[in-house]
Each structure stands twice: as C-alpha cells, then as structure tokens.
Amino acid sequence: MVHASSRPRSVPGPQAVAPDADRARPRRQSVGGRETRTRTALVTGASSGIGAAVARRLGDEDGWRLVLTGRDPMRLRQVADDTSATAFAADLTLPGADRQLADFTLATAGPVDLLVAGAGVGWAGEFRDMPPHTIDEVFDINVLATLRLVRLLLPGMVAAGSGRVVLIGSLAGCVAVRDEAVYSAAKAAVGAFADSLRYELRGTGVGVTHVVPGVVDTPFFERRGAPYQRSRPRPVPPERVADVVRTAVLRGRDEVYVPSWLRLPCRVRGAAPGLYRRLAARFG
C-alpha cells in the first residue's frame, strides 16, 4: 500500500553513474547581495517512484545540489540527467554501501543539508506464505538501510546546527493493512523511529519529517506481484507526494499525510481502536 518499488536486478557494487565533478562541486550564489551556500540534498530510492519525483521537484528549484542513489543504474542516470544531479548507484543493503555513499556525497557535494529517504520495497500476500528471505529484504530496505544512512549523516547535521531528515513512511505503518503484515510492521518502525529521533534532536537545529502517503501511482504494485484492487483510497501521482515533501521541508513540518484526509483513519484507530478494527475487518 504505498510508494516504493521492489528489488530490481542487483547492482554489482556502488558506482557513480553521473560523476560530473563540476556539476557536483558545491557552489555559492548571490541572494540579496550576499553569498549563500548551495544546499546539498541526498535522495535515496531516486531511480523511480516517489524518490524520482522528489529529485525532479528539488531539481526545478535553485539552491539545491542533488546527489541521487538507487539500485537501477540506467533509470538513475536518466533522473540525474533530468535534474542536473550526481548519481551514485548502490544497493544500500550491501555491507559498506551506506558508508561509500556518505563519503561520496561529502567529497563531491559537501555536507548534507537534507536527506530524503525514499527507498522501499513491498510484498503482498498472507504472512504464512511469505518467503523468509523476503521478510529480511523488506526490513533491510525499508528500515535498516535507512537507519544506517541516517546514523552516518546525522552527526554532520548536528555539528552544523541545521538540516532535515525526511522519512517516507506509509499509511500501512499507521493503521496496518491486510496481507501486508511485514510491510506494515516495517513502516510502523519507520514512523516510531521518526518520532523518537525528533524528540532526541530537539534544540539541535535538525528536524525530522515523517511523510505518510496512502496509495501512490508508481510501479510499486506491479513489482510486488499484486495489483492494487481496493476502491479507496485512490492512487495519487508521485508528484503530489513530492510537492508535499518540498512544502514540509520549507515549513519544517514534523508529519504530513498524502492526501491530508488520511490523518482521519489514523486518529480513529488511536482514539477508538476496537471500532477501527471492526470496520477494517469488514471493509478491508
């Protein structure tokens, strides 16, 4: 029930696929007669879906130096070319890939001001039929790879006294979804991590935004092996999520829902869990 795509063919190892040094080098620009540093944004899962849409949205604006990562070098190169970004193809679940990405970003674009963690994978079906290796994959990509990358980049943000981490969650993590038990659990972990980290970072100048989309019109459902068949919520384009991400970054918002009415079922579940469970069991 959300945003990402399942694992495409494996990348043999981390690799820069658009290593234009002049493009990647941090620049300064004049604003109102004074020079300001171009901010660096790192977007994961940028080869398709929400990550690609976020990259293109940020690429439309001045003042951002973009570094993109994803597991499909060809698609990632296309997004990088569209956004004048530098791309680093990597499977962040592989040992050391997160460190290589962090070092590459620092060397080519400077300290990271914004991390948008958009990488994700799903699986649909009854839990008892889920292959054990797929359980590991869902948690590795949606949770562990994200946490490891945040852990590497966070000290630099705290030292600078500014920055923002944007974590792409899912409605499935807030209300749980039938036949998506492990995916729901993984996205619930992302939401809990966002809240806990936000409390920890209070007063440091670093913010955490949790973005909660419902159904997004991306290749996610095709690649997970099961089409989306529910009547509601209706899929929204990934560009709509990207617009919400941009606004949340500009306004420093802690949590946003796409579309915004999805906040209601989450509140109903919190206020009246018994009622919510009865309704969910009946209407799916």
Image: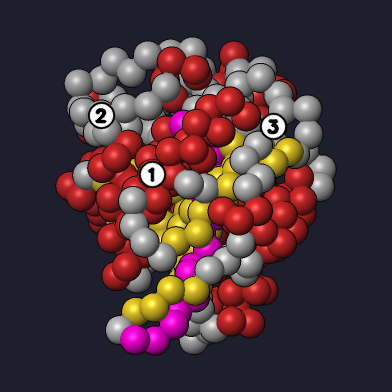
**Crowdedness near tag 3: few (<14), some (14–19) or many (≥20) residues, C-alpha within 10 Å:** few
Task: Calculate the distance from the C-alpha at mark 3 to the C-alpha at mark 2.
Answer: 27 Å
Query: Which is nearer the N-term, disc 1 or disc 3?
Result: 1
| Residue 147 visible from this viewpoint | no
Quarter the C terminus occupies: top left
- Disc 1 secondary structure class: helix
Amino acid at circle 2 = Pro
- On the rendered structure, is 259 left or right of 219? left
Q: In which quarter of the image is residue 128?
A: top right
Determine which residue is flagged by label 3: 136
Magenta part, dominant SS: strand
Amino acid at circle 1 = Arg
Query: Which is nearer the N-term, disc 1 or disc 2?
Result: 1
Residue displayed at 71% across by 24% down: 10
Label disc, if present, on residue 56 of the rendered structure: 1
Of residues 223 and 57, the one nearer the viewer is 57
> Residue 253's x, y, as percent?
33, 67
Residue displayed at 38% across by 53% down: 58
Task: Calculate the distance from the C-alpha at mark 1 to the C-alpha at mark 3.
Answer: 31 Å
Task: Calculate the distance from the C-alpha at mark 1 to the C-alpha at mark 2.
Answer: 20 Å
Determine which residue is flagged by label 2: 235
Of residues 3 and 98, the one nearer the viewer is 98
Residue displayed at 31% across by 44% down: 241
> Residue 237's x, y, as percent?
27, 33
- Disc 3 secondary structure class: helix
Of residues 233 and 8, the one nearer the viewer is 8
Query: Which is nearer the N-term, disc 3 or disc 2?
Result: 3
Which residues fall within the magenta stretch?
A: 33-48
> Residue 246's x, y, as percent?
33, 57
> Of discs 1 and 2, which sits in the foreground?
1
